[in-house]
Image (tube, coloured by chain):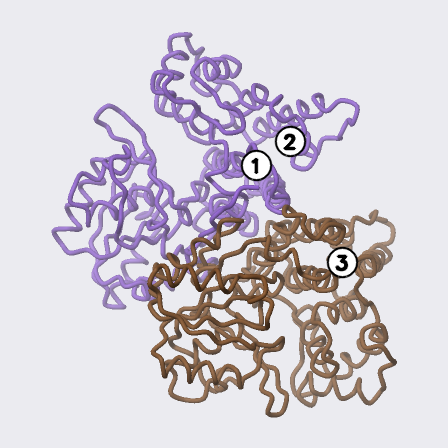
Chain colours: A brown, B purple
Amino acid sequence: MKDFLFYAPTEVQFGKQSEELVAQLVKKYGGTKVLLHYGGQSAKRSGLLDKVCGLLKEAGVEYVELGGVVPNPRLSKVKEGIALCRELGVDFILAVGGGSVIDSSKAIAYGVPYEGDVWDFYVGKAEAETCLPVATVLTIPAAGSEMSEASVITNEDGDIKLGYSNNISRPKFAIMNPERTFTLPAYQTAAGVTDIMLHTMERYFNPDCDMTVTDAIAEALMRTMMDSVFAVLENPEDYRNRAQIMWAGSLAHNDVTGNRLNGDWATHQIEHELSAMFDVTHGAGLAVVWPSWARYVMKENVSRFVRFAVNVTGVENDFTDPEGTALKGIEAMKRFYRAIGMPTTIRELIGRDITEEEIKEMASKCTRGDKIAHGRFKKLKAADIEEIYRMAR
Amino acid sequence: MKDFLFYAPTEVQFGKQSEELVAQLVKKYGGTKVLLHYGGQSAKRSGLLDKVCGLLKEAGVEYVELGGVVPNPRLSKVKEGIALCRELGVDFILAVGGGSVIDSSKAIAYGVPYEGDVWDFYVGKAEAETCLPVATVLTIPAAGSEMSEASVITNEDGDIKLGYSNNISRPKFAIMNPERTFTLPAYQTAAGVTDIMLHTMERYFNPDCDMTVTDAIAEALMRTMMDSVFAVLENPEDYRNRAQIMWAGSLAHNDVTGNRLNGDWATHQIEHELSAMFDVTHGAGLAVVWPSWARYVMKENVSRFVRFAVNVTGVENDFTDPEGTALKGIEAMKRFYRAIGMPTTIRELIGRDITEEEIKEMASKCTRGDKIAHGRFKKLKAADIEEIYRMAR
C-alpha cells in the first residue's frame, strides 16, 4: 500500500449565513489590503460583489477589484494582477467566483513575491517557496479549487494550458452558500456534476486499489451525485441538493476520496485537448471521453470496473460474466450522461464529425509528440489516445 | 439545513515511511524546543521513542521527555507538563501515543501561555485564545484526537471528567504508521473499532438528517470497519486492514462524516459514567450502552434507524414493517459486538450485576442532578438515562 499525505487545511464556512463572515475571516488570516478577483458580470449582477465590498468596508479592510477572469484563465490576466498587487501593496487575494477565478488567484499569489516570471512554475522551471494567502467566496461548484493545491493557467502565447500544484496555495478559507448556485444553468450544472464525479473516478481507477475505506467513501459520493443532480435539474432552487453538490465538489478534490497523486488522470488529459481545440465545456468533454477511456483500459483490472458497475451505477452483478457486468456499468454511465443532458460523442459535443487529422493533432499535443504517456491505471501513448478519440467519435 | 464549519487543518503523513519525517515536520511548524509527551512503557519498548529522539537530535531540535500519561489523562500530569514547559521554554508539544496522550498534550498547550488555572477552560470559566502548537506520532487509533479540536481531562480532585473543544488546538501534523498498531491486543482493537463507529453514529443519528452525501460517507466508513475489524482480529499484522482502521479513526472525528456540533453524543455521555465508576474500556462501554440507547430513542425517527439497518448492518428491508427492520438493525449491531468480543450487557462489562443505587447515581452525575439533558436526536433527562442503564443490565 502506498504512503500518502492528507492535507486539507481550508476553513470551510458552509451555508446561508456564511457570507456574513467574509471580513472577519480575511482579518483572521492576516489580510489588510485585499485583491478582489472575479470573472464576468454575474458576481456584480447577483449583488454578491457589492455585499462583499460592503462587509470589507464596514470592517475597515482596504480592497481593490480586478474582474475579467475567463474560463480557462489567462496568463495575461495573472500578470495584470501581479503588477496591480505589487503596485498597491496587496497582501491577500480573495477570489469571488468558481474554479477559474480561484486558479487565477493562486497564480497571482505565487507571482507577487517571486522575482522571475510566474510561468516558470507552470513549465516546471521553479518551485514556489512562498505565496500570498488566497481565499474564496465560491459561486460555482465542481472545480474543487477551493480546497485543492492545483491551479491551471492558459498561456495565450502558443495556447498552452498547464497546471501547477503546490500545497502552499491551498485557500485559507472558503465561503460556500449553496443559494449562490441556484442560477447556474442546467447544462453547467450537469457538466459540473460530471466533473465532480470524474475527480473521484480519476482517483478510484488507480493501479493500487487497496484503500477500501476510501473506495467506499468515493462510491458513496458518486451515488449521491447521481441522485442529487436530477433533483436540481428538476428544481434549480432545491437548496438541500444544491448543498450536496457544492460540498461534494470540495470533497471530490480535497483527497478524502483518494490521493490525487495516486490517481489516473488520463481522462482529464485527453479532454483538455478537446477543450483547447473546440472551446467546449470541460465537464461535457469528460462525459464524451470517459466511456471510451473505460472500454479501452477495462481489461487492466476488470474486477475494479465490476465494483464500480455494481456499487456506483447499481447494475446487477452477473457473477458468471465479469466483463459483461463491467461493460454494463460503462453503458449505465453513458445513459446517465444522456439523462442529464450531456453529450456522449464528439459529434454531439462539437456539432460535426471530427477529422483524422484533428485526432492525430490532439493526441500528439496531449503527449507532446508522443514523448510522454498519461494514466496510471494504464499508461497511454499517442496511439492509444488516438484510438480513444476514435471510439468517442 | 444547518450551516456548518469544516476545519481539518492537520497535515497527515500516513504510511510506513511517515515516521522519518518527524524532525522536519516539527521544524516546519516552528518547533525549536519540544516536549515529548507519552504514556507508559510501550512507546519505549517498541523503540518508537528512541527513533523519534534520534531523529530530533540529528536535526538539532532540542527536546525534553515527559511520560506517564494514563488512560483518562489526569489534570495533575497536565500541570506537571505546564510547569516543565514554562521552566525550560518549550515551544512545541509532540504527543507520542494515542488519544490520552494527545488530549493531555492539548491541555498542556492551552495551559502554558495562560495565566490562570488550565482547568478554567474545562469548567467553562474561560476560552483559550492561544496555545502552543501540538502534533502527534499516533500509535493507537480510535480516539480521533489527532485531527480533532477536542480534549478530555480527568480532575482527580473530585474525579470529574470534562472535555474542552477549541479549534486552535487541532494538531499541526499527525504521523500515522499502521505497523505501530500491530501489537494492539484484540480487546483494545475491537473496542477501538467500536469507538470509531460510535463517533460516526453519534453524528449520523442527528435530528436534521439532511446532508445525504455525508450520510452516505458515514455509512461507507461504518461498513468498512465492520469488515476490517475481523481481518485484523484474525491476523494482527494485516497492514492493509490496520491502515483502514487507523485512517477511519481520523475521518470519524474530523467531521467528514458529519458535524460534531450537530451530533447526538448521548451514548458517549451515558458511557462516560460507566467508565468513571467501573474503570472499564470506553469502547467496550459504548458497545453496552448503544443498543439500549437505540431501542429507547428509535421512535423519534424510525426511518433513520431503518436506513442504518439496511445500509450499515445489511439487514433486509421489510417495507411492511419499518419498526421491525429498525429493531433488526439494532440486533445486528449487538451480534456484531459479540462477534468481535465486546460485551453487550453491563453484567458482562463489570463482571457482576449493577445495583439500582449505582444506576441512579450514574444518571444523576451524568445530568448533574437532572439539571442538564443529553442528546440531540432525543433529549434525555435523568429518568431516561436510568431506564437506558436498566435496559443494558
Count every numbered label the image shows and give the total. 3
- Dots 3 and 1 on the same chain: no
- Dots 2 and 3 on the same chain: no
Give the distance between the C-alpha atoms of the residues marked 3 and 1, in whole angstroms.
30 Å
B20 in relation to B116, above or below: below
Query: x%, y% of residue B170?
Result: 37, 50
Give the distance between the C-alpha atoms of the residues marked 2 and 1, in whole angstroms.
9 Å
Amino acid at the residue labelled 1: Tyr
Q: Which residue is mark 2?
A: B304
Is B161 on the left-hand or right-hand side of B189?
Answer: left
Is B159 on the left-hand or right-hand side of B268?
Answer: left
**Could you tell me which secondary element the residue under label 1 belongs to?**
helix
- Cβ atoms at labels 3 and 1 below 8 Å apart: no
**Outermost residue, bottom direction?**
A157
- Cβ atoms at labels 2 and 1 below 8 Å apart: yes
**Could you tell me which secondary element the residue under label 3 belongs to?**
helix
Q: Give the mark nearer the N terminus: 2 vs 1.
A: 1
- Of the numbered discs in the image, which one, if any, rests on residue A367? none
Residue shown at 59%/53% (left/top)?
A178
Amino acid at the residue labelled 3: Phe
| Chain assignment, label 2 | B
Q: Which residue is mark 1?
A: B204
Q: Which residue is mark 3?
A: A305
| Chain assignment, label 1 | B
Crowding at mark 3 (Cα within 10 Å: few <14, some 14-19, many 20+): many
Which image quarter: residue B233? top right
Residue in the foreground of this view, choosing between B374 and A209: B374
A50 in relation to B183, above or below: below
